Image (cartoon, coloured by chain):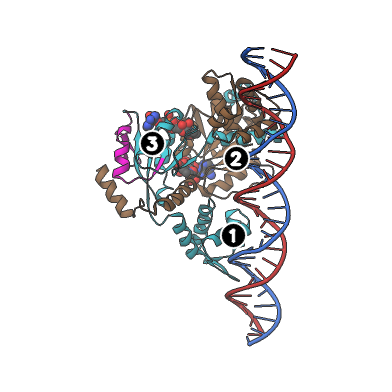
Chain colours: A cyan, B brown, C red, D blue
DNA sequence: GGACACTTGTGAACCCGTGCACAAAGTTGC
DNA sequence: GCAACTTTGTGCACGGGTTCACAAGTGTCC
């Protein structure tokens, strides 16, 4: 269930503030969901609550972690160490959640050897070897769109069964492989769509207007 | 509708390959959706197809662009120019889709004045002024989680009505403001969840094992 | 010009997630 | 111990999105 990580984060926040037990009502509020939904979600994991009291924060935290698979470390390879790849590699939030960035790979020979976030960037040729030697099961694709399908094919062939794709491309993978997509341009376009409906395009600009304003403000 | 950007991208790809008309079946395949769904989606925009033939690529592209609001430019401010903020600022894919990165803002005085992607980073104090002068309607939040709510409040108070939030925090905004969240850690956790179910955790490692392997491979 | 092949647009069944509402269970106070 | 209160776990109804299936429209070929 896609909401478990959300609950886990809310619980971690509560634990840090020293809270020992929470009601579904409170926890639902901190996670931004309906309390009935939260109870139903948690009931799938088992009956971990106490009627009249609520849920024990630490215990529930552990149960959710186990359910998600966060009691174990997962090795991740990032393919494509450009703008986005750098940011991801340098992000500390992954390691703290049990995701170990095990390897960085790029096709550009100039990038190979470069050190990013304490890890040497490897050449794309080594991809398969790294996956097997480091027992990597999760791949992150941050290459240009045109390379995405090829990279995913190679990841899958080498044994990776979960992929997070940032490239704006439709990628096909065989059954049994999980592919999730993060598409930032689409997110912005959805916002623009609603924006247009809201303001009757009052705030939209032509390219010329925007350029003029930029000139005036930024010099 | 959240799928329109997807269709638009598929259409752009077809247009570049010189295709003049597509059937719903073909277009659905390139967008990775069901053809009936696609037809129903497009029918909301009007009857832009020709029975027996399909849809005219260029015409449909224009209609979708107009629907989303991409015939106009939107000014965007990025708040928090750290790892992620840099990547976003340097990304060319936004500008080419009608999103003009108008300003970069950071609270760190050391960052202010730094030039990123041809734009000077401004200090957070100037946020409200920049929003008004540059007529910014979309805000991107790439600050640490603890600053997210405050930043969003300031964005909204200054007139921003659409926010894309990358910080792993539950942010509340008043009605009429659109808030979308991109949560990369959650994406990875969802993958880990499925991964665990698939392999019976065969590929999961303890932190020690992972460290050992890393040592062996990376030196 | 008529038969045929093809494709859109949409009615209708279906499925799944959501939220209400309540009974069951547990706790507190006396 | 019992009554009153709190909170979980869940049956059930509602609604929105998805998919099937087909009638209605369009181009083509002879
Ligand atoms: N940077 C962003 O903020 C951002 C935002 C949204 C989407 N994206 C998408 O993410 C992807 C990466 O973006 P970026 O800005 O980092 O691009 P980038 O051009 O800076 O980096 C891409 C990197 O991938 C490497 N590469 C290319 N082909 C490869 C291959 N076959 N194997 C391994 N590495 C390969 C390149 O050498 C380069 O270093 C793109 O698809 C982009 O559309 C990026
Ligand atoms: N880097 C990634 O790949 C990644 C991945 C997932 C999530 N995130 C999230 O995105 C956010 C940014 O990540 P990052 O790696 O770029 O962090 P970072 O620490 O590198 O950058 C954060 C920047 O925000 C600035 N800042 C802090 N408070 C501010 C305020 N009130 N106003 C304006 N600027 C402020 C800081 O000065 C800093 O430059 C974090 O919430 C992080 O959890 C990042």
Secondary structure, mark 1, is helix
Q: Quadrant of the N terminus of chain B?
A: top right
Which residue corresponds to mark 2? Answer: B163
Question: Share a chain, discs 2 and 1?
Answer: no
Residue A37 x %, y %: 61, 57
**Residues under numbered marks 2 and 1 in contact, where contact means CB atoms less than 8 Å apart:** no
Question: Share a chain, discs 3 and 1?
Answer: yes
| Mark 1 C-beta closer than 8 Å to ligand 2 | no
Q: Which mark is residue B76?
A: none
Q: Is residue B119 magenta?
A: no
Relative to A87, residue A50 above or below? below
Q: Pointer 2 indicates a residue of which chain?
A: B
Mark 2 → mark 1, Cα distance in angstroms: 30 Å
Secondary structure, mark 3, is strand
Using residue D6 as the reference point, say whether residue A20 is left or right of it. left
Q: Which mark is residue A79?
A: 3
Q: Quadrant of the C terminus of chain B?
A: top left
Mark 3 → mark 1, Cα distance in angstroms: 38 Å
* Pick the front one: A87 or A65: A65
| Mark 3 C-beta closer than 8 Å to ligand 1 | yes
């Amino acid at each position: 269930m896609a909401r478990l990580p959300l609950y886990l984060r809310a619980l971690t926040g509560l634990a840090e503030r020293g809270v020992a037990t929470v009601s579904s009502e409170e926890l639902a509020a901190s996670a931004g969901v309906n309390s009935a939904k939260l109870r139903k979600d948690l009931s799938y994991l088992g009956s971990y609550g106490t009627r009249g009291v609520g849920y024990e924060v630490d215990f529930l935290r552990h149960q959710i972690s186990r359910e998600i698979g966060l009691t174990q470390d997962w090795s991740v390879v990032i393919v494509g160490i450009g703008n986005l790849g750098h940011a991801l590699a340098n992000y500390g939030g992954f390691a703290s959640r049990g995701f170990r960035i095990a390897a960085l790979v790029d096709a550009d020979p100039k990038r190979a050897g470069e050190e990013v976030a304490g890890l040497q960037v490897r050449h794309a040729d080594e991809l398969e070897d790294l996956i097997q030697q480091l027992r990597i099961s999760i791949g992150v694709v941050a290459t240009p769109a045109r390379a995405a399908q090829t990279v995913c094919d190679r990841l899958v062939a080498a044994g990776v069964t979960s992929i997070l794709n940032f490239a704006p491309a439709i990628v096909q993978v065989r059954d049994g492989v999980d592919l999730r997509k993060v598409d930032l341009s689409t997110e912005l376009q959805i916002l623009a769509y609603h924006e247009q409906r809201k303001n009757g395009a009052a705030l939209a600009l032509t390219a010329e207007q925007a350029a003029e304003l930029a000139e005036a403000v930024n010099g």
